Amino acid sequence: IVSMGRKKFSADYQLMFRLLKLFLFIGFVVTLVIFFLFLNLTVGDIFVCLLAFMPTGWALLSITIACKPFVKGLKMWSSVKALARGYDYIMGIIIFTPVAILAWFPFISEFQTRLLFNQAFSRGLQIQRILAGGKKHK
């Protein structure tokens, strides 16, 4: 809906496009509140649904891309590209956020060094001196 609204409203009717996005956001929030209040939805349920529908979304995108000429004939190819781009962003965030957070911890760096230089460690080499880049004494 947003990609079609961007096509129709973005240049000429920027206020209409922003209102469309606002109404979509408000509708999404209201739907979630209704689910939480009346259907006893929990955050765990949302997490389970995301885990269940991620592979389904990827499969549907793959099928749609395989049927590219048909989808282009329906004039929906730009929407599929926008959906695939958003899916790619979300998957990147889900995959790389834990990696980035773990990279901040010092023990992960030491563990990685240990894995990379495992053979050297087993021979008794001390990597910290090499990594520190100490000056040679003559």
Image (cartoon, rainbow, N blue to C red):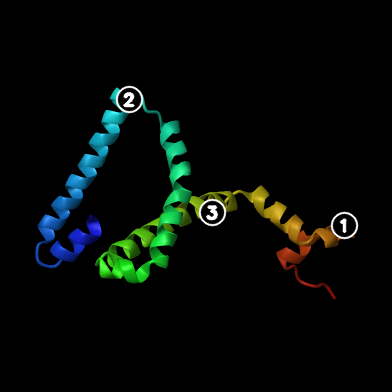
Residue type at mark 2: give it. Answer: Leu
Mark 1 residue type: Ser
Label located before the other in sequence (1 or 3): 3
**Does the CB distance between marks 1 and 3 fall below 8 Å?**
no
**Residue bearing the label numbered 3:** 100
Percent of width and height locating residue 57: 42, 52
User: Depth check: 76 or 136 in front?
Assistant: 76
Q: Of helix, strand and loop, which one carries label 2?
A: loop
Q: Residue at x 26, y 35 (%)?
A: 31
Quadrant holding the C terminus: bottom right
Mark 1, Cα crowd under 10 Å, few <14 / some 14-19 / many 20+, is few
Closer to us: 72 or 78: 72
**Number of the label disc, if any, that sits on residue 39:** 2
Q: Is residue 52 left or right of residue 126?
A: left
Task: Give the Cα distance between marks 1 and 3.
Answer: 29 Å
Dot 2 and dot 3 residues touching (CB under 8 Å): no
Label 1: which secondary element: helix
**Which residue is drawn at the image coordinates 78% and 61% (left, top)?**
117
Whether 109 is drawn above or below 136: the answer is above
User: How packed is label 2: few (under 14 Cα within 10 Å), some, or many (20 or more)?
Assistant: few
Q: Is residue 101 above or below residue 82?
A: above
Q: Residue at x 14, y 51 (%)?
A: 19
Disc 3 is placed on an element classified as helix
Residue to which mark 1 is pinned: 122
Closer to the chain start, of discs 2 and 3, is 2
Q: Residue 88: x percent and y percent?
A: 43, 59
Where residue 98 sits: x, y (%)?
54, 49
